[in-house]
Image (spheres, helix red, strand yellow):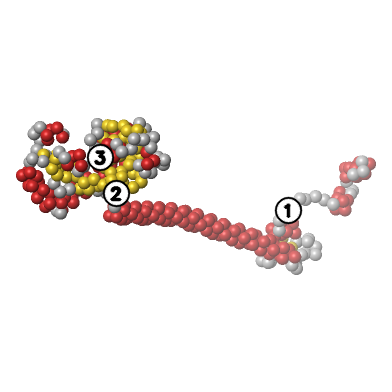
Amino acid sequence: MFDSLRIGQADLIANQGITDRRSELFGFTRPVETFPVSIFTRKHENAISTIQSLSGKTVAVVKLNIGEIIVKDHSDIIVHKYEHVEEALLGLLSGNSDALIYPEPVLWNLARQARIEDKIKVVGEPIIEISRAISVLKKNQTLLKRLDTAVEKLVGSEKFKTIYTRWYGSPTPFWTVDKAVAFMTGLLVIVFICMGFWRYRSTMSLNKSLRKHIAKRKTAEQNLKQAYETLEEKVDERTRHLQDALEKVKTLSGMLPICSSCKKIRDDKGYWNQIEVYIEKHSEAEFSHGMCQECSDKLYGDEDWYKAYKNKSNNKGI
């Protein structure tokens, strides 16, 4: 890039760090940016904190960059020079270098683009601050004045602020206030919906269970009512039977008009009934007919067959 400017293949270098060595060759506009040059290490490196602690360490620098100039004054540092900053950063992450000296905003922007900003860190205070500007050959003063006037207008403008923020500003965090509010609002809505659905399901389940219990209770009440009615019917029937039996017992227990000769009984209607017929009619008793000894002797005592039967029965003990 420097050679292209010197031999006339280019008219200017759009952004270059201002150093004493470069000022001997080029003319610079007023600075467009100023930033610190710092020491970078891996995230979990704790032995390095200042440039003095780099003694005996391997330090990565980029050729023709300010870092190369800084390490020249420290002969006790092992210098590893790279052609490009990307190579120097990978050398640090791979462990080929213990530290990297480079302009801080530029390296942070590169790390964010590569999504490895969580792998490195800045240690200690900045080693130096360096300004950057547009450079041209010293002999091209006309172009330098035009550029310097344009830079003066640019630096104070909103356009410059937008450009600077784009390249060196901190990345916009994913969780902004608006996003957080929107997320929490959405989360609350989801929670309320879930709670409402759960409450609806719980209520429906409870109502279903309640309906089952009510149906069981109604069935039990109906069964109980039927059992009660059946019991009442049985009690009434049993009571009627008892009343009928009691009436019969009272009838047989009362004063019965009986013939003193034939032993017939007169009923309530005035009819005379054989005693066994009357009793069977008014009770559960039944009669079987036979003849007692006295009646047998009275009726058949003079008959020869009866006498023979009687003697035979006496001999057998009947």
Percent position of residue 42, x then y: 36, 39
Q: Is residue 132 left or right of residue 251?
A: left
Residue 314 occupies quadrant: top right
Say which label, 3 or 1, has the lower sequence index. 3
Q: Is residue 160 above or below residue 58?
A: below
Residue 105 occupies quadrant: top left
Numbered badge on residue 71 = none
Q: Cβ–Cβ below 8 Å for labels 2 and 3?
A: no
Q: Amino acid at mark 1?
A: Glu
Asked which secondary structure carries label 2, the reply is loop
Which residue occupies the foreground of this view, 48 or 27?
Answer: 27
Q: Amino acid at mark 3?
A: Ile
Q: Residues within 10 Å of mark 3 (few under 14, many from 20)?
A: some
Reading the image, the residue beneath label 2 is 173
Q: Residues within 10 Å of mark 1 (few under 14, many from 20)?
A: few
At 75% from the left and 53% from the top, the residue drawn is 287
Camera-nearest label, 2 or 1: 2
Reading the image, the residue beneath label 3 is 66
Q: Is residue 231 left or right of residue 211?
A: right
Percent position of residue 40, x then y: 33, 41
Q: Is residue 318 left or right of residue 282?
A: right
Say which label, 2 or 3, has the lower sequence index. 3
Q: Cβ–Cβ below 8 Å for labels 3 and 1?
A: no
Residue 310 appears in view: yes
At 72% from the left and 65% from the top, the residue drawn is 250
